[in-house]
Image: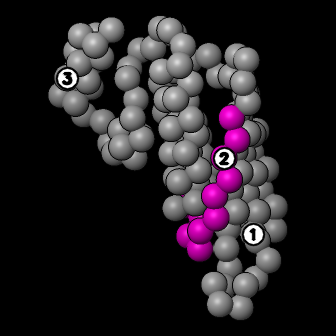
């Protein structure tokens, strides 16, 4: 599993890389068979009514599929979060379509919220009862 980050048209900062790595690690815990993940951050052309828009694209390769998500927002960190949430939703659909051993059941709301030990154990129990 590899993570490749490309940042265009803006200066690179450790904070941006930290947020991307944090969301990638979260996805990797959910689905351990990730092959590669490419994240591209760019500034879309200035729109006179919307101002500066940040564009975030993620191309993720898992066994047998390539998942792609593109999001834009005026706030870079919101765009990063939304793009990773969309990829998490695509992974969830892929996991439901196949019988793959998964450590945790994942939903989009779980990806956006901070997990607690109580939430994890109840979700694991619910997942085990359904399968």
Q: Is residue 8 visible?
A: yes
Residue 66's x, y, as percent?
73, 30
| SS state under label 1 | strand
Q: Nearer the viewer, mark 2 or mark 1?
A: 2
Q: Is residue 124 above or below residue 61?
A: above
Which of these two is toward me, 110 or 9?
110
Q: Is residue 79 above or below residue 116?
A: below
With 9 as the anchor, is 65 left or right in this view? left
Judging by the rendered image, the residue that carries numbered circle 3 is 122
Is 37 covered by the magenta stretch?
no
With 35 as the anchor, is 84 left or right in this view? left
Q: Looking at the image, which residue sits at the far front?
A: 97
Crowdedness of circle 3 by 10 Å Cα count: few (<14), some, many (20+)? few
Judging by the rendered image, the residue that carries numbered circle 1 is 43
Judging by the rendered image, the residue that carries numbered circle 2 is 69
Magenta extent: 67-77
Quarter of the image for residue 91 reads: top right
Crowdedness of circle 1 by 10 Å Cα count: few (<14), some, many (20+)? some
The quadrant of the picture occupied by the C terminus is top left
């Amino acid at each position: 599993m590899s993570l490749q980050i490309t940042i265009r048209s803006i200066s690179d900062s450790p904070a941006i890389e930290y947020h991307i790595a944090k969301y990638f690690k979260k996805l990797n815990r959910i689905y351990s068979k990730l092959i590669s993940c490419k994240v591209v951050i760019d500034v879309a052309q200035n729109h006179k009514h919307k101002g500066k828009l940040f564009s975030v694209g993620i191309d993720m390769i898992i066994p047998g599929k390539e998942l792609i998500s593109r999001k834009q927002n005026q706030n870079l960190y919101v765009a990063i979060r939304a793009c990773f949430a969309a990829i998490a939703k695509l992974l969830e659909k892929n996991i439901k379509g196949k019988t793959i051993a998964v450590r945790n059941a994942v939903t989009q709301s779980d990806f956006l919220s901070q997990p607690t030990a109580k939430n994890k154990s109840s979700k694991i129990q619910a997942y085990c009862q359904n399968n």
